[in-house]
Image: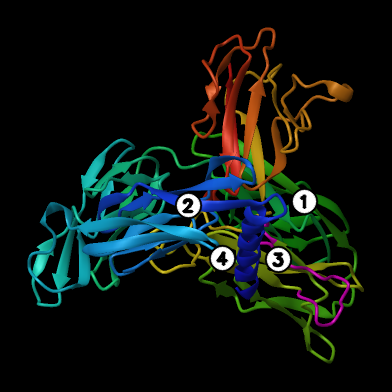
Amino acid sequence: MFGRHCFKVLGLLCLVLAFTGCNNTQVSTIQISPQSQSLSAGQTVQFTATGTVLHGNHSPTSQNITTVVTWSSSTPAVATVNSSGLATAAGAGTTTITASMPGAASATATITVTASGGGITAGGTIVSMAIIPGSQSVASPGQTSQFIAIATTSSGATEDVTGLVAWSSSTTQVATISGGGLATAAGQGTTTITAIAANADGTVVTGTATFTVSGGTAEPLTALSITPGSQSVAASESGQFIALGTAGSSGLEENVTNSASLQWNSSIPAIATVSPSGLVTGVSAGLSTITALWTNPDNSVVSANATVTVTSTPAPEPLLSLTIVPTNITVGNLQDTGNFLAIGTYSTAPQVRDLTNTVTWISTAPESFPVDTNTGGSQGAAAGTVTAYGNGGAVIVAEATDPTTGSIQTAIATFDCPLVLPNPPITAGSCFEGSQANGLLVTLTVYNEGLNTAGWLVTAASATGTQDVLHCGPGWAAGGKAGGSVCTATYPLGTTVTLTAPAEAGVAFGGWSYNCTPTGAVTAAGPNSCTVQLGTVDSSNVTVGAIFN
């Protein structure tokens, strides 16, 4: 945490020096827009700071300095403001928002927070809140249900505050919710509905309920992987495989090893068998391919393969098991870290050994939750340390290879940085969207949602302008090699990527998925293009579908 604040201060000094350096350039005055704003508790407003910049003997110019100035609120219990000028209403009253900068005059604006819909008339502050009903269910997407928020105040009175609270849905792919508590089904699944009320003293009270959509289509998986990719066991001995699935639109990975939608198969059961939970058991000497098949609700199938080698006779197996300690770490702020330990159990003394610096560490979400690994075994290294660069969670996998037999032991744990509501929270910090550090990477995945498999093509340049870094589809023939059906490319966080579907003979274009904005009219003949913004934590892995008919 100290390092993050240091970099922020250094960044501010560098920007200030850019105004006051050798060119005799400086900010003389600051203006804030808007000058005044009226909000209800939980609502936000973005302030913009504009500076009048003097350039020596040249005419002054105006420049947006919103991210350079220091923002503050005179009464945080009424409203807070973050370092980017985004203010959040907390409780009834008036506060002064100030933008200041070393060597320049400061500027102010006002926020008045009122209780929309009449406010809390029963008196006292809110001490608890209930959502009625506690759970609701609808049959299909598009259907709606009304939730009501009932607050209990310090005086013991109860009041309907449905129109005064901030509503949110934990999984917008399942359902969204309006400011009046009306939930609208979007896709199959269950989501948590949260209502948040802010008191005048800055305290926050929440209530939760569940909303289930029993019909419709759940988000499909577009990719599947097996960890480890290969392992060796002796006849009658076992080894564990782990299946990780990548969701379509969100790009999030999850452990689907034991899911009912996953089927495990062995190509030669006489050599090795595999259980419904991915546990492989050697039968006789040889090599068998282990396949994991995932069936989506639309009956499309994704698969992954791994191999298992079975030796004829059991070899000495000094490493009996591998465990990660602890099994879960939860942090509360971005760039917080947690350290996992890998503990091995052996058949010979010493039976229990610390393998943290010798195992291979893997994160299922390396862009948001990277884990340090140190297979060289150096003592004191940061192996097993996970850093939070986004909200959500990741499965952390440790792999240990027995030097005698080559067999692999695996263990898993979880690392979480939960989103704190409201977003952004009233208290600075936490794992809220938009506060991630620079330099993080985003994986963009492109695939064809249509029926044409013969000649379609999607291309994109890198963040530095290198053309055709991403080239997806059989229409790509550069170097004598066609593009794949599912393609990925890595970009810095915050990059805006333009995807292009060039005109292809005999190929009709049907459109882009919702998260890629067309740059012009979409035509069947093409060419067509769209832009996707890789700039939020929730989309640290982004998948875009193109429809070719």
Q: Give the image location of residue 530, x and y in percent.
A: 58, 26
Q: Which mark is residue 371?
A: 3
Mark closer to the observer (4, 3): 4
| Mark linked to residue 29 | 2
Q: 396 above or below 549?
A: below
Looking at the rendered structure, the kind of residue marked 1 is Ala
The image's mark for residue 306 is 1
Q: CA distance from mark 4 to mark 2?
A: 34 Å
Q: Give the quarter of the figure containing the N terminus.
A: bottom right
Mark closer to the chain start, 4 or 2: 2
Question: In the rendered structure, which segment of residues is drawn in magenta?
Answer: 363-382
**What secondary structure is found at the residue carrying circle 1?**
strand
- Count residues near mark 2 (Cα–Cα under 10 Å), then give few for <14, some for 14-19, many for 20+: some
**Residue 448: image location, x then y, percent:** 62, 27
Query: Is 377 contained in the magenta span?
Result: yes
The image quadrant that residue 501 belongs to is top right
Residue at 72 percent of width and 53 percent of height? 22
Name which residue type carries label 2.
Thr
